[in-house]
Amino acid sequence: MTGDTKKIRVMISKDTERAAYIVNECWKTTYQGYVADVQLSTQWCQKRADAIRSEVESGSLENFVYDDGQVQGILTCGKCCDEDKTDAFELWRIYVDVEKQGQKIGSKLLKFGENLAREEGFSEIIIWAFSKNKPACEFYRKNGYEILDKKQLGENFHAEGVRFRKIIS
């Protein structure tokens, strides 16, 4: 690893509180107005925090942080769980501290995830975004992702999701 990629490392237990804070603040600032309010509630923020903690403790997903002296971003990834894409790699979470957005941290996390997928032998990457999250959708398109399909997401979301994919070699 060189340069800023040295700042990306495996998430450890002590990182989970900061990572959950970043994810939940992004939900509150980015998704407000187009996801169900229940998703922004204290209860659901706690559920996301518990999920991150559980993933790190169990190793069920691969979790990484961008750490420049403090955790500023999070990447969660692993084998895709979509029934029609079981041979693909999925990027579940790419979130950057609201105060650090626009500093290329998200791009570095995305490239790190793509390289990890290649190293693990995958040729296709999947990532979901809310269709109303125009900056995220544009970010993925700019980075070579194409829209695979769209679907209405279930209860508690009440929002449309866009599934992106990228073929990697």
Image: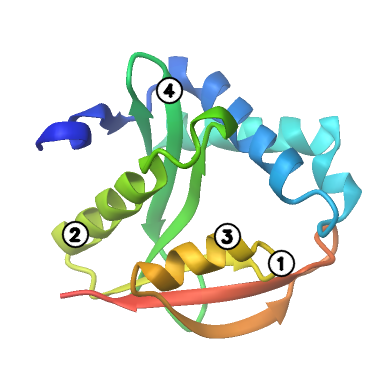
Q: Residue furthest front?
A: 102
Tell me if 95 is positioned left or right of 47 in this view: left
Residue under label 3: 135
Q: Quadrant of the N terminus?
A: top left
Q: Which circle's residue, 1 or 2, is located before the other in the chain?
A: 2
Q: Quadrant of the C terminus?
A: bottom left
Q: Mark 1 or mark 2: which is in front?
A: 1
Q: Report helix, strand or loop for mark 2.
A: loop
Q: What's the CA distance linking mark 4 and mark 2?
A: 25 Å
Crowding around mark 2 (Cα neighbors within 10 Å: few <14, some 14 to 19, many 20+) is: few
Q: Nearer the viewer, residue 148 or 155?
A: 148
Q: Report helix, strand or loop for mark 3.
A: helix
Seen at 46% across and 42% down, the residue is 102
Do the numbered discs 4 and 2 sit on residues whose CB atoms are within 8 Å?
no
Q: What's the CA distance linking mark 1 and mark 4?
A: 27 Å
Seen at 68% across and 33% down, the residue is 25
Q: Quadrant of residue 135?
A: bottom right
Residue 37, position as x, y percentages in the image: 90, 48
Residue 159, position as x, y percentages in the image: 79, 67
Q: Disc 3 marks which amino acid?
A: Pro
Do the numbered discs 1 and 4 sit on residues whose CB atoms are within 8 Å?
no
Residue under label 2: 120
Q: Report helix, strand or loop for mark 4.
A: strand
Residue under label 1: 132
Residue under label 4: 71
